[in-house]
Amino acid sequence: MGLDVDLVVPLPPKTRRRRWVRLLRNGAVALVLLWLLAFVFATWDRHRATEALRKRGMPASYDEAVAAMHAKVGSETGADLLRRAIKENEKLGRPGDFYVPAKHDFVADDADRARLDALARQCDPVMVLLNEALKHPPAPFTRSGEIGADPALRSEEAQNLRSFARLMWPLIKRAVLRGDHDEAVRLLKVSFQIGERLSTDELIIPQLIHVAILGVANAYAHAVLPAIKLNEKQFRELDELLAGIERGLTFERALINERGAMATLFEDPEALKSEMYSAVVGQVPEWMRGAGILAERGWVELVRSPIGLPVRRRAAAYCLSVPDEVLALVDHPPPWPDELQKKYEPWQSTFNSDRLMLTARSSSAFGNVYWAGLRARRRLVLTRLALRLKWHFQVHGRLPERLEEVCDATMTEIPLKWFEGRPLAYTKTDRSFRIDAEPSPADQVYGSALAREDVRVGSGLLAKMEFAAPAPVKKGP
């Protein structure tokens, strides 16, 4: 009886080791070749995108963006003075308790008056520098190594600028309590001019700070206008200032500069580290926070390392490739036509370092700027309408029956383009008014909070005032 037996002769241990070594070596060579191929293509894309921008005179890096700002404006004196004023303001310890005008009646006891007087004396050095800075042409405030050096400007610099704007409120309140309405109006104008001067920082984060400062100034205006008397010269100057800021509010240039600045960020491992680490925090569900953060931080370190250079360079190239027509949409009133919306969607998350993360992020840097600018414009329009209603009430002793009655040669119709063309709802009593706007799709992120008046005011959907008994004054200065 014969048996057929297949004998499997095991390889000697030395031969097996050689096979594994050969496989590992070939795999390593393949990975190196793939990395080199990715690096070459990413570098070529980066070079091509950079040259395309430079041929059109557009900045392709952070330094080029800053140089373009200085070349356009020229003078640096105003910015230097503002910088010195902010340093003086830091010594005051940020009077944040005076920031939000909670009441319109301006009632104060002796202790409150004494506190305001003491703070005003402290503020004198700041106001001297500020008044001098406002006499000079606007100049970029961004400097390498100083405010704005990081395209994603962080809390300390932002707080300095915001506290600078907040400095105005105790001074305005003090002027009103003293009956010095001329000084109160002057300081109110200064509150808007601070934001106007800082708007020359044409990068995204400084522009968002600019919008925040304008929001502070709007809050001051709605608090102080019912409590003061204007003459016609003051009314015209304030009206012209608000109209000029609203007309001049533009973010396209900031996005053009940010295109180059973000490309620089993507290729800077140290700058990218803080950005990507900040994106990790708060993005992982609680139940898997420890493991999730550990995995994402490991990914951050890999992307920051030389191994991740092709990924970072490819992201920079993609960032530099955003079409100008897409960036121009930031100043286009809603709603966008379908063809523009389709052009925007592929690029909406381009300016986010989050796009390099393992998990998808919902935020959009472009969208954040767009909606912040939309709300700022709506608030400026509502503040201008409130100013005109206040002037009508002061001159005629009553509020108009229709909102259109405040129109004149300098405002021939109610500005509605930033409200999607929909009419504003105007209601009034003998001594108060309310203007309501319909929420846009962007406002739906607030959900049920839109029922709160403070949210509607901050979104540029509501303005209201209540006046004391009318006391008509003569026109003229």
Image: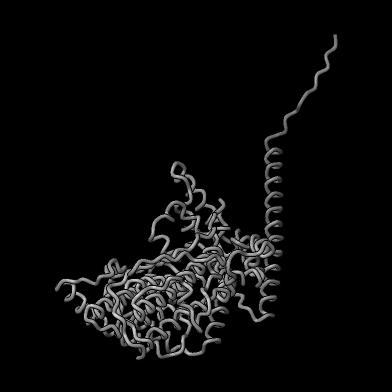
Work out which residue is located at the far right of the displayed protein and give it.
2
Is 362 left, or right, of 446 in this rendering? right
Rendered view: 312 above or below 209? above
Q: Position of residue 96 (x, y in %)?
A: 29, 69
Who's the residue at 31% across and 87% down the image?
Answer: 128
Front residue of 448/386: it is 386
Name the quadrant containing residue 449: bottom left
Is 272 left, or right, of 181 in this rendering? right
Q: Position of residue 240 (x, y in %)?
A: 45, 83
Q: Assign the C terminus to one quadrant of the image.
A: bottom left
Work out which residue is located at the far top of the displayed protein and give it.
1
Q: Is residue 271 visible?
A: no
State the colouring used for the structure image: one colour
Who's the residue at 67% across and 51% down the image?
Answer: 28
Front residue of 442/321: it is 442
Q: Position of residue 420 (x, y in %)?
A: 56, 65
Q: Assign the N terminus to one quadrant of the image.
A: top right
Rendered view: 313 above or below 19? below
Q: Position of residue 217 (x, y in %)?
A: 38, 74
Q: Is residue 388 visible?
A: yes
Name the quadrant containing residue 399: bottom left
Front residue of 15/155: it is 155
Is 270 left, or right, of 20 in this rendering? left
